[in-house]
Amino acid sequence: MIERTPSVVVVGSVAIDWVITPKAERERSVGGSATFFSMAASYFGPVRLCGVVGKDFPEQSLADLRAAHVDTEGLEVVPDGLTFHWKGRYHDDMNHRDTLDTRLNVFEHFDPRLPQSYRGSEYLFLANIQPALQLRVLDQMDPRPRLVGLDTMNLWIEHTKDDLLKVLARVDLLTINEEEARQLTGEPNLVRAARAIHDIGPRSLVIKRGEYGALLFHEGEVFSAPALPLEEVIDPTGAGDSFAGGFMGYLARVGETTGESLRSAMIYGSVMASYCVEGFSYDRLAGLDHRAIDERFMAFSRLTHFERARLL
Amino acid sequence: MIERTPSVVVVGSVAIDWVITPKAERERSVGGSATFFSMAASYFGPVRLCGVVGKDFPEQSLADLRAAHVDTEGLEVVPDGLTFHWKGRYHDDMNHRDTLDTRLNVFEHFDPRLPQSYRGSEYLFLANIQPALQLRVLDQMDPRPRLVGLDTMNLWIEHTKDDLLKVLARVDLLTINEEEARQLTGEPNLVRAARAIHDIGPRSLVIKRGEYGALLFHEGEVFSAPALPLEEVIDPTGAGDSFAGGFMGYLARVGETTGESLRSAMIYGSVMASYCVEGFSYDRLAGLDHRAIDERFMAFSRLTHFERARLL
C-alpha cells in the first residue's frame, strides 16, 4: 500500500529560456513551469518534481532545486538530448511579450512517469503541458489526490480541446489566463465564463490577469487578489507558475480547501509571483525565508485594507 | 463674503452620445463627464454642475438632474446651438472602444463661468476638459477649495501639456487612466509614474484601470480597489466619471481626507462605477438609494476579504 503524504507533485516543463526585456537580457535563464512552481511551493512543504531535461541543463540548477528540498527523482535527464528552449522579448510595459523561438528538444517526446514514491501524494499540479500527458499523469496517482490543479494555454485549447475537456472534467482547480478563459468558453464576460468552466468540471477557478492580479471563483463567491505594484520588474517569466506554487503549497500546508483557506492561498500565490518577477529565472525566489514571505503577505494586507463599516 | 459649503462643484462635458455595444445600441444616450459625476455624487451631498448644452438637450434630463438635487444654475443652455455629441463602438470584451464621431458643437466655445453661489464650495472637480479652462475655473473659486480634483486625457497631454502642468501644480488629486499616466510621465512603471506625478503637484493620485479597478497613491501608501466582476455590462461609458463622483462625494460627506477616508472613497467610487455600467446613460445611476449603495459596498468588502493573520 502506498503511503499518503501531504506533499505536492508537479509535472511540467523545465526549460532554458533566453529572456530579453527593455532593460536587460539573459541568454541562459533556467525556467519552465515546473521549475518556478517547485521553487515557490518549496517554502510551504515537500514538493516532488516530474519533468525532463537534456545534457545541457546546468548542474547548478539541479543543485539549487535539491537545496530547496525539491524531490527530483522524477526529473529525467536525457543524456543525448537538449533541454526545452524558449526565447522571448518583453514589451516596454512588461505585460506583453513576443515569442522569438521555441525548441521542444527532449520535451517533444516527454512521457511523464511518476516514481512510486510520488504516487500517493495528496496534491497534484498538472502544469501547462499537453492535456493527453496531464491525463496520463493523473492516471498514475493512486489513490486520487485530495486536490488536483491544472494549468493550460491557448495552444491546447485550439488544437487538443477534446483531451483538455476530458482532463478538466477530472480536476478540482483550474488556473488560466483571462484571455484563455474567454477562448475556452467562447464567453467574453468573465463571470459567465467562470460558470461555464465550473460546468466543465473544476469547482475552483483562478483567472490570472498578469499585473492586475487574479480572481478566484469558488462556490458562488468571487475573491479578487491584486498584484503588488512593484517599482522594479526585472523579468515577468514564471509569475503564473510561481503563483500556482505558492497557492498549492499553502493549501497543502494548511490541509484544507475551505473558501477562507483558498483566499489566503491566493494571497500567498501573489506573494510568490511578486518575488518571482523581481529577478531573472528563480534568482529572487531561491533566496527567501518565511519572514520575507510573511512580510510581503502583510504588504498585500495593507494594499487592500479599508474600513469595512464605513456605510452611508 | 462668500459662504463656505461642503458641496462639490463639477465642471465638465454634458453630452448626447451614440453608444454601440456588441449586444445593443442607443442613439441618444445622455452622457458627458459632468453628468455622470453629478448623478453619482448626488447620493452623498450637494452637487453643483457647470457645463453647456444646446437646444437639442432633452428637457427630461434636465428634470432628472434636478430631481437628483443637482444644482444646474451653472449649466448654460445655448438656444441656437447643439449639444456636444460623441459616437463610439465597444469591442466584444467591452474594455476597448473606437470613437466613430465627435462633434464639439456648443462645447467648442465653452467658457465656464461659475455662478456666485458655486464659488465658495469646499470641493471642486475639474472633469476632463481643456486645461486652460480648468485653470480659469479654479481661478474663479474663492477661497481656494479644500480639495481640488482633476481628470484629463491623452489629447491634452499631447497638445496642451504646458497648460496641463500648470493646472496640475495647483490641484490636490489627479484621476487618470494608466496609459495616460505613462504618457504624461514617460515612465512605463506605474510606481515610478506615480512618484513623477506627485512631483508635478497632486499629493493624491488615482490610476484608473477600467475593468481591473483603480490604484490610489497617497503619502507613500498604495491602495488597490478592484472592479466588481459583473455578469451583465450594458455600457461602460461614464464609469470613470461615476467613480470620481462617488469618490469626491464621499470625501465631501465625511469632511476629511485622511488615508483611511480616501480608501473608503475609492470603494464608494468603485460602487458607483459598477452601477453606472449596468445601464445605458445614467439609467441605473439615477434610481439608487443609500441601501443599494451600501449593499454594493458590502459586496466589495466580500470581494476583497481575507484573513489578515494567516502567516506561515
Image: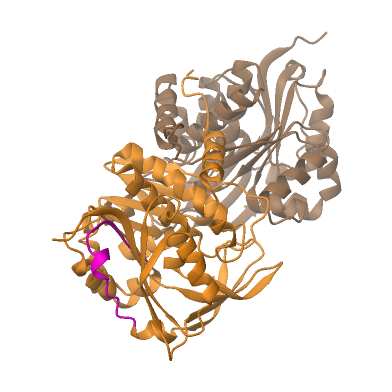
Chain colours: A orange, B brown
Please give left or right for residue B94 compared with residue A279 in the image: left
Q: Nearer the viewer, residue B104 or B227?
A: B227
Instruction: Judge whether B61 appears above or below B95 on screen.
Output: above
Q: Is residue A210 above or below residue B261?
A: below
Residue B59, how many percent across, how many down? 54, 30
Near-viewer residue (B185 or A272): A272
Q: Position of residue A183 (x, y in %)?
A: 36, 65
Q: Which residues are magenta?
A: A110-127
Give B257 or A11, whichever is nearer the viewer: A11
Query: Does the rendering let one see residue B288?
Result: no
Q: Residue at x 84, y 28 (%)?
A: B139
Residue B308 belongs to magenta span = no
Q: Is residue A110 visible?
A: yes
Q: Residue furthest left?
A: A1
Picture coordinates of residue B262, whole percent (x, y): 61, 27
Does the magenta-highlighted stretch encompass residue A111?
A: yes
The quarter in which the N terminus of chain A is drawn is bottom left
Residue B163 shown left or right of residue A98 in the figure: right
Q: Quadrant of residue A261?
A: top left
